[in-house]
Image: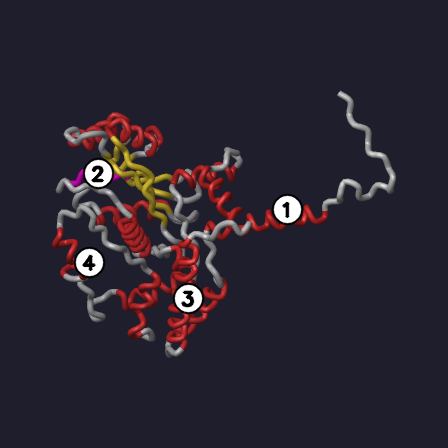
Amino acid sequence: MPFGDREDELWEAMKPSFKPRLVSDPNLKYARHLVNGTGPFATRTPATSHVRGDARATLARVVRRTPEVLVKVTGRKKGAKHLAAHLDYIGRHGDIPLETRDGEQIATKEDAQRIADEWSDPLYWRQGTTVSAVAMVFSMPAGTDAETVKQAVREAAERMIGDNHDYLMALHTDTPRPHVHLTVQAEGVDRKRFDPRREDLFRFREAFAEALRSRGIEAEATPRYTRGQGRAGTSMALTQLRARIRSGASRQPTEADLRQAREAMQIALGKAHQPAFVSKTRARWQDTKRRYEVAAERLDRSADREDRKLARDVRQFIQERGSIETVPDRMLREAETRVREAQERTRTRPSPDQGAPRGTPPPPSRRR
């Protein structure tokens, strides 16, 4: 392999690292291992690490624009009534069967209500409204075989949570992107709660992508900055609302868009500065590009023709992404355009007396 000791550094550029969450962690020994990198979190040696074989393949998929899997939490269902309504929705009111963890099909509203009650009843002793289930969606681009997507989701769910949490699945093919709704019981067998965070969602993405690849479908799970894209940072509700605006179904702009537009205008007028994360995003992309360039140089020196071809693909990928653009960057560009257009109109607008011969009386005032 051409990477040698550099492969771990390249892997860090393509896969995120997450800071441990230690607040209110009852298992202090687990937290100590997590922070210190000891115990189950000890650094693996190159001989036992899977990184050395994965870094090159991941790099190839990134620069050759392999489709990225999408995994999102779409909501948390509180109580049997809320959960039953969700199951009725993802089952399209009985038109789409729900599949249990064991592969059993739930086709009637009564059976779905029974499951909603079973998942919610053990929580009666908790004070206040408690989450009974977590709703997730797994999606792939248009053209992907829908049945394979469902099989991959089942494998990912079984690998990630199948030993502790019950779940239901529903495959939807009524949109160009085949997607699976996965509803997970919040209360586990060991009484631990399912509450996925960023790092958990990324592990779900990796498991989903690996399951797809094992079935012959190219898929990858990498952070946006790895691909030279600014962070999304928007909720599912905001994404859906913006989609309705683009389609013409709604004309009311979102509060988030209005706020970003106002902030961008203040920056364009020189009265404010870009958010700190924008400069950090650019710096991170520059560091990622540097690591890609180092990888390309090492691939170029390889005797393997495929390695040298990958080096060319890496350089082309970098060339096409000279800079990274975030949402504030795009809003600022639009605001600067509006400011320039307003200044142009001011410079080219004729004065009230321009064009009229000298001595021409003013037009008569309108009588009321």
Q: Foreground: 311 or 321?
A: 321
The quarter of the displayed image where residue 104 is located: top left
Label 3 or label 1, whichever comes before in sequence order: 3
Which type of secondary structure does the marked residue at label 4 adopt? helix
* Label of residue 342 in the image: 1
Which type of secondary structure does the marked residue at label 1 adopt? helix
The residue under label 3 is which amino acid type? Lys
Label 4 or label 3, whichever comes before in sequence order: 4
Q: Whole-Å distance between the Cαs marked 2 and 4?
A: 27 Å
- Residue located 25% across and 46% down the image: 157
Tell me the residue that label 3 is attached to: 289
**From the viewer's perspective, is 123 left or right of 249?**
left
**From the viewer's perspective, is 292 left or right of 48?**
right
Q: Whole-Å distance between the Cαs marked 3 and 1?
A: 38 Å
- Residue located 76% across and 40% down the image: 352
Of tags 3 and 1, which is closer to the observer? 1
- Residue located 36% across and 48% down the image: 70
